[in-house]
Amino acid sequence: MLDTALSEGQLSMAEHRQRVSAATNAATLGELQSLTADLQTSNAPVTLPTLKSPKRIQDGGWGIRLAVAAVLVLFGVGIGWGIFGSSSPLSSGADPGAVPDGIAANTQAPPRLLHSANGLNGLFAQARKRWGDTMGYSLTIYPEYASMERADPKDARRTLRYVYRGGWNDDPSVSATSEDERLVDLAEFGVNAIIGRLRGAPQILGIEQSEVKSTYLNIEAGEDPLAADAVVISIYVSTTYEKGGYLPVDPQGEVLSQHPPS
């Protein structure tokens, strides 16, 4: 009866839900009748018997049995609706989009936090997925974003700068390629060693942890002509008192020189 009233526009979805909830908790036929007293029910597929008085029906009587039967019918219809994912047999106006579809939430996504082994590896995985390699002129990695300079595949005189924020952008900035720039594999280093050195850089540079404002990595080609394919990684640490230092290290995290705040 409530489903029919919903389909005919006598009840809103909110009113329908409230009355169905009350029906499933009803203890007497009189309580069920009160839920339909203000409705036009001539088109409903079922009817409720007329009560002589609004007295509460004693437990064990035929009234309570009818009430229980009505509740069980409504409850069975609700279960069938949820299991089979079809429209209610008592209503043709139900929204199909409200029927549960059983699809779980997908929370997999590229990393946003980059100063960790998983973050760095995920960053490079996204570069390989995008371009097929991790070749470039330089890569700067902040805690939550990064920027990579790559050669323009259509014009060697141009350098394209891409920004990563949970994914690489599609509109890189363009600049002229310097003569001394050299392409290297920017991922060719020991990730775990560099992350460990990144976390220990403030102490090596004599900076109190409470004074650290930010840290970032810069990766680029080294200057050693005997190691043309090697990268040099500089770990920069800025402080709250507007001075900072940096720590150049090799691909295995060995310190090459120290530049504390001056």
Image (tube, rainbow, N blue to C red):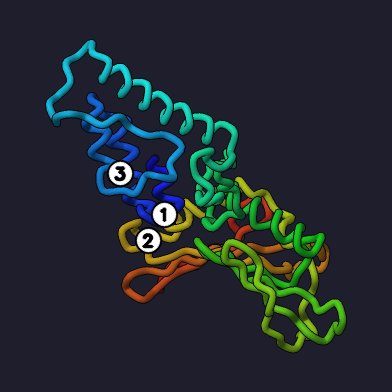
Seen in the image, is 123 located left or right of residue 65? right
- Vertical order, 177 against 127 (above or below): below
Q: Which type of secondary structure does the marked residue at label 2 adopt?
A: loop
Q: Is residue 114 above or below residue 165?
A: above
Classify mark 2: residues with Cα within 10 Å, few (<14), some (14-19) or many (20+).
some
Residue 156, how many percent across, how many down? 85, 82
Mark 3 element type: helix
Q: Quadrant of the C terminus?
A: bottom left
> Could you tell which of marks 3 and 2 lies nearer the N-terminus?
3
Disc number placed over residue 18 in the picture, else none: 3
Question: Residue 145 location in percent, x, y?
Answer: 55, 66
Rate crowding at label 1 as few (under 14), some (14 to 19) or many (20 or more) other CA atoms within 10 Å.
Answer: few
Q: Position of residue 235 (x, y in %)?
A: 54, 63
Q: Earlier in the sequence, mark 3 or mark 1?
A: 3
Q: Which mark is residue 207?
A: 2
- In the rendered image, residue 225, in percent from the top left (x then y), is placed at 81, 68
Residue at screen point 26% across, 31% down = 50
Residues at badges 3 and 2 in contact (C-beta under 8 Å)?
Answer: no
Amino acid at dot 2: Ile
Q: Residue furthest bottom?
A: 176
Q: CA distance from mark 2 to mark 1?
A: 6 Å
Identity, as a three-letter code, of the amino acid under mark 1: Gln
For the N terminus, the image quarter is: top left
Q: Which residue is mark 1?
A: 203
How far apart are the alpha carbons under marks 3 and 2?
63 Å
Marks 2,1: beta carbons within 8 A:
yes
Q: Which mark is drawn over residue 103?
A: none
Q: CA distance from mark 3 to mark 1?
A: 63 Å
Identify the element where label 1 is drawn.
helix
Question: Could you tell me which residue is drawn at 74 percent across and 70 percent down?
Answer: 223
